Image: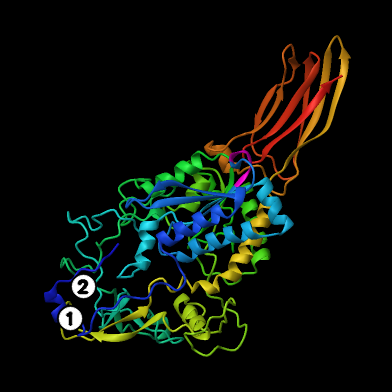
Amino acid sequence: MKHLFCTAFFISLWSPLVQAQSAPTPPGYQDHAQLSARLKTLASRSGNAATVESIGKSLSGKDIWLLTLGRGKATAKPALLLVAGIDGSHLAGTEMAVELAEKLLSSTSDSIRRVLDTKTIYVLPLVSPDAQAQAFAKLRFERTGNARDTDDDRDGRLNEDPFDDLNRDGQITQVRIEDPTGQYVPSKDDARVLVKADPAKGETGRYLVLSEGVDADKDGQFNEDGEGGVAPDKNFTFDYPFFTPGSGEMPVSEPENRALLDFLAKSPNVYAVLTFGPYNNLSEAPKFDRSKTAKRIITGLLEKDATVGEQVSKLYNAQTSLKDAPAQPATKGNFAQTAYYHHGRFSFSTPGWWAPKAVSAPPARRDSSNTSTKPGLAVKGGDDNEDVRFLKWADANGLTNVYVNWTPVDHPDFPGRKAEVGGLVPFARQNPPVRFLADNVQKHVQFMTALAGRMPQIEIVNVRSESLGSNLHRITAQVVNRGLLPTGSDMGDRVRWVPKMKVELKLADKQSVVSGRRIMLRGPMAAGETMDVTFLVSGSGRVTLEAGNAMTGINQQEINLK
């Protein structure tokens, strides 16, 4: 939400006497224009297996692209929805979503071909293009908000206290100021990283730590109100954070949010949602907490849904073998939770990539020319701090452009004090060079394929038609869920945004149901659950028995009235 702001007067006071630089573009990542061309090319080369369309535009007018994968009529098949780029700082999610789509379309695997024949995969790779554009701007900083002007500090002015590029390197990092009231000290595992002092360990603070910039509006706060508007992943309806910077004036106030939720509302065939983003409920599934489900406003997974979450989490860990995931708690107003609590879909989220812990080989020589496509080496030590863990991984893999060494600057708000600019480069920790994502993309292809194969499968079995005389017929049948997952979430049955399971006997002229319900609606069927149906029908000819819904597909059986 910040932007470069400095007058020539201030530059003369505190900027180093060097020419401003442009920070390097994140290695291998693509801006919106490049992504748009890539998606269109992918769809055009995929025959009838992929289409691309815009489902809306961001506040600045950038298209929000939908890539639809699968053969046959997309809306007539059960679907999975893959969403990325809601958090604008998570470039890796966008890249992984597109690479995953590319791998699905190019695969010759029978299992993947079967998925594309029987399921629809919707891919929204970049929901927040305005925020992600900051990664490719002249001044780079981790932005999550769109292009809306906001008054985050509620002082009646817009964007009056943005970030300032004090060392003129084209990117925003941190400022540390030596101060006896400071709470931060260099980490014992890596002195480049600052951590809070722990009095229990005999530590006393040494530094104040601020974002890189000055207090432009002289209100005692630094860079609290700059360009970068409303963060889409704080603007959804569940657990909406009222009166919080970046959350907007009301839920779903932004065109990006409306486009996504409108699409979900118009797509009843979406069975489950997978989000690539900072939140992670796949490496370790949330536990059932009865106290959170007994309230009027439910804030925890329902018991049966929590069981499904554990099942899918085990599948994820088995298919990806990604261990030691960092703790990533849910933020308020995010999409992944809104998709479950307010739209009734099973909803899973993962960063897709994180710096690994375990040692896989000796450390590599630090060499920026390293072009390995391997997942990357890792080293032990400092694993409790994510910054330390990432820097050790970066060092082991020869990445030299992920950190700015602490460099003295003259800071106008701290005259005569030692102030230094430095820290992790924007976007570095969550977004490794693209070449390191390939292995994880393949693992997520395996997970998506396995998840699709476990989706509910409705069959009509043991059908019998028995003549009772006088043109009456008794029809009996069993409807069974042969899949390994239920036909929908219990939450979906409560919020009523998802279709009910439906069993219907379709009749021709001069046919009627004498006994039994011609149309039956019910809640989710568990994996392996069987439902017995019986009808007494008057008439002759054929009738059709249908069972299922948009999320499971419709199974039909024609029955001769004997």
- Name which residue lies at 17% across and 77% down: 413
- The mark found on residue 102 in the picture is none
Point out residue 361 in the picture as x, y percentages from the top left corner: 62, 86
User: Pointers 1 and 2 in contact (CB under 8 A)?
Assistant: yes
- In the visual, does 555 lie left or right of 351? right
Point out residue 133 in the picture as x, y percentages from the top left corner: 36, 62
Is residue 198 something that shows in the picture? Answer: no
Is residue 312 something that shows in the picture? Answer: yes
Is 494 placed above or below 505 here?
Answer: below
**C-alpha gap between disc 1 and disc 2:** 10 Å
Badge 2 crowding class, 10 Å Cα cut-off, few under 14, some 14 to 19, many 20 or more, is: many
Residue type highlighted by circle 2: Val
Query: 308 and 37: which one is in front?
Result: 37
Q: Earlier in the sequence, mark 1 or mark 2?
A: 1
Residue type highlighted by circle 1: Trp
- Name which residue lies at 57% across and 55% down: 45
Point out residue 241 in the picture as x, y percentages from the top left corner: 37, 52
Magenta residues, as a range?
Answer: 75-79
On-image quarter of the N terminus: bottom left
Is 270 placed above or below 496 here?
Answer: below
Query: 171 and 385: which one is in front?
Result: 171
- In the visual, does 82 lie left or right of 197? right
| Location of residue 186 (image quadrant) | bottom left
Point out residue 181 in the picture as x, y percentages from the top left corner: 26, 80
State which mark lies toward you, 1 or 2.
1
Residue to which mark 1 is pinned:
14
Q: Total marks drawn?
A: 2
- In the visual, does 457 lie left or right of 239? right
On-image quarter of the C terminus: top right
- Name which residue lies at 74% across and 56% down: 110
Residue to which mark 2 is pinned:
214
